Image (spheres, rainbow, N blue to C red):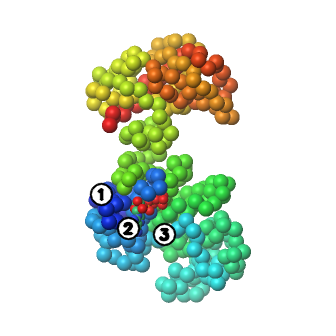
Amino acid sequence: MTHVILRDLTRRFGGVTAVDRLNLEIKSGELVAFLGPSGCGKTTTLRMMTGLLLPTSGDVLFDNKSMVTVPTEKRGAVMVFQKHLLFPTMTIGQNVGFGLRMQGVHKREIERRVDEMLELVKLPGFAPRKAHELSGGQQQRVALARALVVHPKVLLLDEPLANLDANLRLEMRELIRSIQRELSITTVFVTHDQEEAVMLADRIALMFDGLLQQYAQPQDFYQRPSSVRVAHFFRNDNLLSGTRRGAEVETPLGTLQIDPSRMQQPDGKVLVTVRPEDVQLVPNPAEGNCVEAKVLLQVYMGTHTQVQLDLAGHTWMVHSPAHFQAQVGQTITVQLPASSIWLLPTS
Ligand code: ATP
């Protein structure tokens, strides 16, 4: 169990700042996802944590000890890559036991730990096989076993599921989560897939352009995004301009009430948002933030119907029950529940 701190961690490549003054703390045994679009600095951060790359400035601390001058092999952090680079001439057992052999562990102890790890990744009895006899998903599980067998302090996974098909990805996510819980290894998982981050992580660090945007539990990215850009990344583009005055916000649709627990923005200009799944379609105007909207489009999605609405000139998306039906151009009533309204800064 290792507690990790990244302090003002910065890496520049020529004129490009790949990671810019990154500060975050990962608790012992926590699983954190580094999430963000391609090129936002996720892998660069991971490589600085392993020691494969030196920071331009800042520090990486494991249990309050600076790692910057500690060589990779002495840090106790292991990395699993997107491409499972197994040694083709070795058996699976030899692949998994490789790190232990390097450490000079006794042969019988290696065999015991290799068998234990293959059991853990649900590949018992695979030790005598060669890599080419295994499927892509099985090879990725071997790569995971090889990383875990040395009892790392910190496990770093760089998009380990990117090459797998949808079903295998799901299986591997569950496997990684259950092994990580069982062994309580401090783990960082890099992904650009927000669903994967939400399913796996205790906390998500969302990065754009080398800068940390929000570091929080998965549900906060849906219910309490820190900016319009963060809301957009989590597929919410429902926005309405307004002015907050105490527990109310004036909008082109009238005055809306806001819940006391959701008043983080100061009085003044704000953007009002409600997630598509939290907007309610109601049969008749009622008390409590009911407004009129015009139906622009509706698309049946199987589990729900996606309805595009015009709210005072702003286009909003709403997830309604699958059986919802209205005419395009029809005016309907929607409710923006006070407990679902979230205020965002205008810039
Ligand atoms: P992806 O999801 O595509 O792997 P990422 O978020 O992991 O992206 P990084 O690989 O960390 O992003 O790259 C961050 C930025 O740093 C990018 O602009 C990239 O081009 C740049 N970069 C990374 N490594 C180098 C390098 N060795 N030399 C020059 N620029 C680099």
- Tag in front: 3 or 2: 2
Q: Is residue 25 above or below residue 59?
A: above
Q: Nearer the viewer, residue 39 or 253?
A: 39
- Residue located at (60% from left, 80% from top): 87
Of the two numbered discs 3 and 1 on the same chain, state the one appearing first in sequence: 1
Q: Which residue corresponds to mark 2?
A: 48
Q: Which residue corresponds to mark 3?
A: 79
Given the image, on which type of amino acid does mark 3 rest?
Met
Of the two numbered discs 3 and 2 on the same chain, state the one appearing first in sequence: 2
Q: CA distance from mark 3 to mark 1?
A: 23 Å
Q: Are marks 3 and 1 in contact (CB under 8 Å)?
A: no
**Secondary structure found at label 2:** helix
- Residue located at (42% from left, 17% from top): 253
Q: Position of residue 332 (x, y in %)?
A: 56, 16
- Residue located at (67% from left, 31% from top): 300
Crowd around label 2: few <14 · some 14–19 · many ≥20 (10 Å):
many
Q: Is residue 147 left or right of residue 70?
A: right
